[in-house]
Image (cartoon, coloured by chain):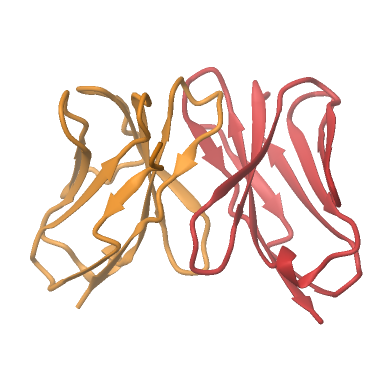
Amino acid sequence: NAGVMQNPRHLVRRRGQEARLRCSPMKGHSHVYWYRQLPEEGLKFMVYLQKENIIDESGMPKERFSAEFPKEGPSILRIQQVVRGDSAAYFCASSPYTGNTEAFFGQGTRLTVV
Amino acid sequence: GQQVMQIPQYQHVQEGEDFTTYCNSSTTLSNIQWYKQRPGGHPVFLIQLVKSGEVKKQKRLTFQFGEAKKNSSLHITATQTTDVGTYFCAGNTNAGKSTFGDGTTLTVKP
C-alpha cells in the first residue's frame, strides 16, 4: 500500500507562471488536506477536500489559489501568477475518515519562485 | 476561529537531558495528535489522545491530554540525537480539520 504521493518534489517557477501540485492519497482514503509550511514555521491549513467536494477552504488565499479533488485522479493545488511569497513547502495529507483520525502526510512539494 | 498555541518555539538540550513541549487550544478538543518532522522531512504521526486526562507512553516519550481537553504535553526523557526535529501538536474538533500548533524545534547537543 503506497503512501501519500506528491509530485513534483521540487518545483521552480518564475514570477507570473502557474504552479500545479499533485497529491495522490493513500488507497482507500477519500479525505485530503493541503498545508503550507514556510521556512522555519509551522504547518498552516489551507483546504480540506473529499472526492469532488471542497469541505473547508478557510485557509486558502482568496485569489490565485484553487484546489480540486476529482472523482478520478489526484488532488490538485493550483497557484496562478505565482509570486516570491508563494515559495514554501506544500504538504498534502490524507485520511480515511474526518479529521479525527491519523493523517498520513506526503513528502511535500518544495516550490521556489524566482 | 480555533487557535492552537505551542511552546516553546525552540529548545536546545544536552544529550541525556529531558525535553517537554506544551500545546494549548482556545477551544475544547475532541482529540489531539502529535507529529514529528525531521529536518527536510515530512510530518509523521506519533500518537492520538482522545480521553480527558489520558496519558500514553512510547518508550522515552510520554504524552498527556488535559482534563479539560484543551491542553496537552509531550515529554521526552533522556534525549538522544535521534530525537532532533520539530514536534507538532494538532488539535481536532468535530468540524473535520486539524489545527496545527507552530511546533517546537528540538536540537540535541551530543
Q: Residue at x 72, y 40 (%)?
A: B24
- Quadrant where the N terminus of chain A is found in the figure: top left
Q: Give the mark count.
A: 0
Name which residue lies at 23% across and 43% down.
Answer: A62
- Position of B46 with respect to A32 (left or right) is right
Q: Residue B27: tell me if it is visible.
A: no
In the foreground, A40 or A50: A50
Where residue A44 sits: x, y (%)? 45, 48
Where residue A73 appears, as percent x and y from the top left, is: 17, 34
Q: Residue at left 90%, top 62%?
A: B18
| Quarter of the rendering containing residue B67 | top right
The colour assigned to chain B within the rendered structure = red
Farthest residue in the bottom direction?
A: B110
Task: Describe residue A12's horizontal placement relative to residue B70 as left or right.
Answer: left
- Where residue A29 appears, as percent x and y from the top left, is 37, 26
Position of the C terminus of chain A, as image quadrant, is bottom left
Chain A colour? Answer: orange
Q: Left or right of A43: which side holds A73?
A: left
A14 versus B57 height, above or below: below
Q: Residue at x 86, y 52 (%)?
A: B60
Extreme front residue here?
A: A1
Q: Is residue B6 above or below residue B31?
A: below
In this picture, residue B42 sits left or right of residue A18: right
Residue A98 seen in this snapshot: yes
Find residue B61 and report its horizontal and vertical position in percent: 82, 49
Rendered image quadrant of residue B102: bottom right
